[in-house]
Image (tube, rainbow, N blue to C red):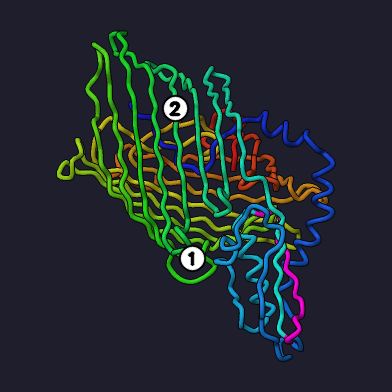
Amino acid sequence: MRQAERAGRWQWTGAPVLAAAMAAAPGAWAEDAATEAPADAAAETRGAPSAAAQAAPQPAIGEIVFEGNEHTRAETMQRELKIAVGDPADARRIEASRQAIQDLGLFKNVRVREESLADGRQRLVFHVTERHYLLPLPRFDAKSDGRYSYGAQVRWDNAWGLDHSLRLLWLEEDAKQQGIGRETEYSGSYSIPFIDGSSYGINVYGGYRSRPVDNDDGRSYSESFRDAGLALSRHLGGPPASQGWRVAVGLDYDDEATSGANAAPAYGTAWSPTFSLRYRDWHYRIYSDVGEQFAFNYSFASETFGSDYHYERITASYARAMQIGATDHQTLAFNASTGLYFGQPEQLHPFGLGGADALRGYEVNFREGDAFWLLQLEFARPLYKPWPWLRGVVILETGNVIDKASDFEFDSPRSSLGVGLRVRFKNFVNFEFEAGYAIPLNGGGGRMFASKV
């Protein structure tokens, strides 16, 4: 049977990576906090000019240049700017542009300064400090009940300096499911957010999984899964280009095959047109994030369009994070997500809850079904002011999985309460870990959790 999809957002990439990274240069963490946090704070207040400054005549911008971008191309940052040559040098719009470049998540910090030109106009200089964009990662996880997985992942962010992204994964996993042996997985994806400077983007992916399966009578056969997809997207509205609405349409291919003398009948092939709508107003503040995001996805398959079975699938999610109180990087975040699956094959249950990112107090996929809902409330706060990269987190979650989407309701929720630590590695793109302990509030013993956020 096909493995249930994880309903949450994160995946565990291995405690050895966390330990090695923290041990690599312990003094660098304190140095980063001492030298860059004040600069970041100053930049955040850059957009609050005095009343006198606002009333004074503003010179025009004569030139915009970028510094420090040894890898990142100028056009990647240019399309985020909310100000252009010829516009008045408005302090608020300059700060909004600095923050928009920082919101790309590609830089350890972004600063801006103004220089006077001979003709009285102003030159804007955006200085960026780049991160490491190519990152190989080991993958390892082990449970007390004998479940384990290991493998490797390659992440290339900001490929070619154009904010493209490449992901390659190899994974071996033994989930200790009755009748199912160790599974091998290979997958990859490549994303281009903007094609040749246009408003259009493209994403492609592909994957392969295989595993041995035992029949009820003990005889074995092989089961394999292949998937691939392509989506074309378009950004709606003006700059910054990485924010706002984006709509996408695409086509997914899924195939399940079985082989061997004792093989069970295969699901077959599904060709699935897809539609998605996303909204992003998300702001990166080096060690924390604020803003809101929304995503809606719809896909379907039909025998009329060449598939061996039919289905409809709907997922939606919303996230909001906000700064609370006077302590820098003290945030409160709310996440809500849901999914519905109607159709065939009947033995396929695509959604699951439990594990390191969704109801942490429960085992991975402790419930599987054709529908789910999940609510999460997270409070995070730096534990030591000179170390803003280290935050304590309290996570309250509630949700449930429903066997049939037609029976969807919000009764019988399962709830979980967890506490832990989060570490954000500012030298890499989108690289944050958490680890802690969670208990199920419906009864039962607690469990450790660890994952990449």
Looking at this view, name the residue that lies furthest to the left: 304
Classify residue 103 as left or right of residue 250.
Answer: right
SS state under label 2: strand
Foreground: 87 or 223?
Answer: 87
Q: Is residue 189 magenta?
A: no
Label 1 vs 2, first from the N-terminus: 2
Q: Quadrant of the N terminus?
A: top left
Q: Is residue 112 magenta?
A: yes
Can residue 243 be seen by looking at this rendering?
yes
Residue type at the position of mark 2: Glu
Classify residue 451 as left or right of residue 69.
Answer: left
User: With respect to residue 108, does 301 lie above or below?
Assistant: above
* Highlighted magenta segment, given as a residue range: 107-120
Q: Quadrant of the C terminus?
A: top right
Mark 1 crowd level (few <14, some 14–19, many ≥20, 10 Å Cα): some
User: With respect to residue 5, does 39 lie above or below?
Assistant: below
* Residue 294 in the image, given as x and y percentages of width and height: 46, 58
Mark 2 crowd level (few <14, some 14–19, many ≥20, 10 Å Cα): some
SS state under label 1: strand
Q: Which mark is residue 278?
A: none
Foreground: 208 or 161?
Answer: 161
